[in-house]
Amino acid sequence: MAQQFDLIVVGAGMVGATLARALADAPLRVALLDGMQLDAPLRARATGSGYDPRVSALSAASENILARLDAWSRIDPAYRSPYRHMCVWDGAGTGQVNFDAAALGENRLGHIVENWRVQQAVLESLGQTDVQLLGGRQVSGLTRDDELWTLELADGERLQAPLVVAADGARSRLRELAGFAMREWDYLHHAVVTTVRTGNSHAATAWQSFLDTGPLAFLPLNDRDGQHYCSIVWSLLPDQAQRVMQLDDPAFLAELEAAIEGRLGPVLEADPRHCIPLRQRHARRYVQPGLALIGDAAHSIHPLAGQGVNLGLLDVAELAQVIRAALVRGEDIASLAVLQRYERRRMGANLAMMAAMEGFQRLFHADALPLRWLRNTGMRWVDGMDGLKAGIVRRALGLEGELPELARSTDQAG
């Protein structure tokens, strides 16, 4: 006998857990399913810095979503690292653009937060709801009959619901089982990720240099015991990434310091490095009858601007709003007509961001002298245009244009 629900969210990462929380007070039987256990606190990897290497740059819109759902306040402020400025420059030229939150009347551009802390905060807030947490379960099969989806689990258990949402990441098993077509291409880059200690303060600034080999970002983390820390994401050609991974610590620190032009003083220590192949994916459709894709299951993007999780949380806000509105009107929330409202509102925005990141990537890899001159001249021009810079930042923060209802909050994310 299969367990019956109105909605099953598959994937309890930051995005999937947030969707379950966003619909926890709706008149629905909601289940959140994941392969990991959901009844035990999450833990960071043991590192010298004390920071987990997996972090996200959360925008103001994402903070507001988490605040509305009683999750933001559950993240220890000592581990919410605000950044108020952003400095972006051409490592092979003279162009530079500086962004400042004060120009927008904001007290920060966003926060750098370890992924596991965001996930844990949302799961804790779910503990106060009727959402059923189904941890330690793997989906092995998916069928549809009589307008119900049946999930076959590895242990033989069966779950049924008219509406299933895939939030199980870039390599989504559910997306594959449902037969969604994908557009995919390899960036031909790998990201080297770790946490470093620097001699000088990051000054609440996100630093990003566009090098010939790929972009390098130093993302600010809160100081500890007077020591300064940053999370780094260094995008490199595969052979260069492998070479950097094989360097001993002194050589790696020296090369990293040179790559960032010593802007944060000496790079003194680094946690173990991780190398992640970069691949862009985008589903040709986000929905089919009774099934929707959100977050990385629908789209994965280059970490160039740190927008991945922010796009996913905006997916959550839009889909939750669509479902709530349909419930009020007495509509079938699993119908294709209802789910296509979510698809229409999010696909264009996600494609626009992905196209912009692809354009940046191609522009800064261009070796032709006229293009080098053009991008450096353009960066200097943009840096002098305060109104244009404010518009760019407001869009990146999710503050430009009409936001889903869930994303509008009077709470102060802080």
Image (cartoon, rainbow, N blue to C red):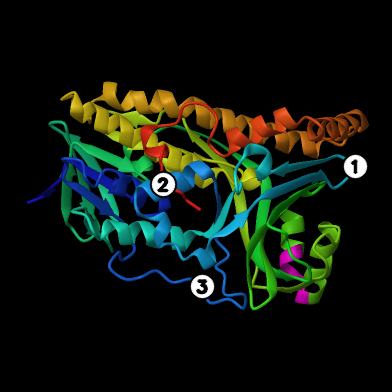
Q: Describe residue 246's horizontal placement relative to residue 112 as left or right.
A: right
The image position of residue 80, as x and y in percent, is 53, 60
Identify which amino acid the numbered label 1 is placed on.
Thr
Q: Nearer the viewer, residue 185 or 191?
A: 191
Q: Mark 1 — residue?
A: 94
The image position of residue 109, as x and y in percent, is 61, 46
Q: Which one is in front in this view, the residue at disc 2 or the one at disc 1?
A: 2
Dot label at residue 411 = 2
Q: Residue at x 35, y 53 (%)?
A: 70
Q: Over which residues does the magenta segment extend?
A: 244-249
Dot label at residue 45 = 3
Identify which amino acid the numbered label 2 is placed on.
Asp
Q: Is residue 375 magenta?
A: no
261 relative to 378, above or below: below
Sequence-earlier tag: 2 or 1: 1
How far apart are labels 3 and 1 at the CA level? 39 Å
